Structures are given as C-alpha cells and as structure tokens.
Image (cartoon, grey):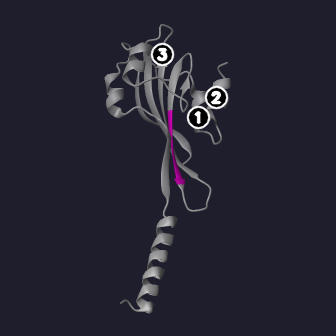
Amino acid sequence: MAKPGAMLRSIVALLAFTALVACSPVYQYHGFIPTEADLEELQVGLDTRTTVSSIIGAPGASGLLAESAWYYVRSEFKHNAFYAPEEVSREVVAISFDDNGVVENIERFGLERGQVVVLERRVTDSNIKGVSLLKQLFGSGASISQLASMFN
C-alpha cells in the first residue's frame, strides 16, 4: 500500500504539470492561402478566373472576391492562458485579373515589423490595382464585411 505522503506528492506533481501545460500558448490559424505548389500551377497571362477557381478555389469567407482581383488571407493567432488572443502573422495572396478575366499578377504579401512587404511577385505589371485594399487587409481591425462593402 502506498504511503499517504507519496500519494499527496503525486497529486501535487500532477496538478503542477496540468497548470504548466495550461499556460503554454496555443496557435490558431484563420483563413486560407494557396500552397506554393498550387500557385506554381498558375500561369500569368494564360490562366483565367475559371482555371484559378478549379486549381485553388475562389476565396471564401476569409478572403475577398473583387472585380479586379481575388485576395486570400490567412492570419495566425497566439492564445496564451487568459490573455486576449494576439495576431502574430498575416499573409495575403493577391491574384489580379485583366479586363478579360486573365491572370495579370500573382503576389504574396506579409508583415515585417508592422510594414507590408512583398514576399513573392510574379507579375506582368509592376503594381496591383488594390494597393489601398492591401493596406486595409493588413491594418488592425479590418474585417471582411468592411472590405466587401467597399465593392458594393
């Protein structure tokens, strides 16, 4: 039979371990961005909205469908114990189309020290049409409903 002191130490150790595990951060991802492999399949100047939709899908609730471009947005949040969730990264893939619906630009943007930076760019034109939209996507508190209202 186990001694009462050994049983108490086991319970205290179990409670300490549980408290330690509960304090470790949990990361959650919201939204969707296409993989590198999927983006490699797209060809600037050749693919259309239909082929983009069949390869990677149209942006869902976490993205934005606009006349000139499709925006895929993914954010990573860190949840730490009882503190408010903290957004630690946000990435945007912008696929813009010309007037005929053909892929004009494929660009990937991220945040570095609070500044929007280009992570990758495959373009026929040096600048996307929705630059101010990107600033809003990376700005704090921008919601998809606010962004969608800009195009209605």
Q: Farthest residue toward the top? A: 100
In the rendered structure, find residue 97 and report the number of the disc placed on it: 3
In the rendered structure, find residue 83 and report the number of the disc placed on it: none
Q: Could you tell me which residue is drawn at 54 percent across and 33 percent down?
A: 62
Residue 100 position (above or below residue 8): above
Q: Could you tell me which residue is drawn at 43 percent across and 16 percent down?
A: 103
> Do the CB atoms of the residues marked 3 and 1 lie less than 8 Å apart?
no
The quadrant where residue 47 appears = top left
- How far, Cα to Cα, is label 3 from label 1? 19 Å
- How far, Cα to Cα, is label 3 from label 2? 18 Å
Q: Position of residue 91 (x, y in %)?
A: 49, 38
Magenta segment range?
Answer: 73-78
Q: Please, what secondary structure does the residue beneath circle 1 have?
A: helix
- Mark 3 Cα shell of 10 Å, populated few (<14), some (14-19), many (≥20): many
**Residue identified by numbered label 2:** 147
> Do the CB atoms of the residues marked 1 and 2 lie less than 8 Å apart?
yes
Q: From the viewer's perspective, is the residue at label 1 or at label 2 nearer?
A: 2
- Is residue 144 or residue 127 the one in the foreground? 144
Q: Please, what secondary structure does the residue beneath circle 3 have?
A: strand
Q: Amino acid at mark 1?
A: Leu
User: In the rendered structure, does residue 136 fall within the stretch colored magenta?
Assistant: no
First along the sequence among labels 3 and 1: 3
Q: Quadrant of the N terminus?
A: bottom left
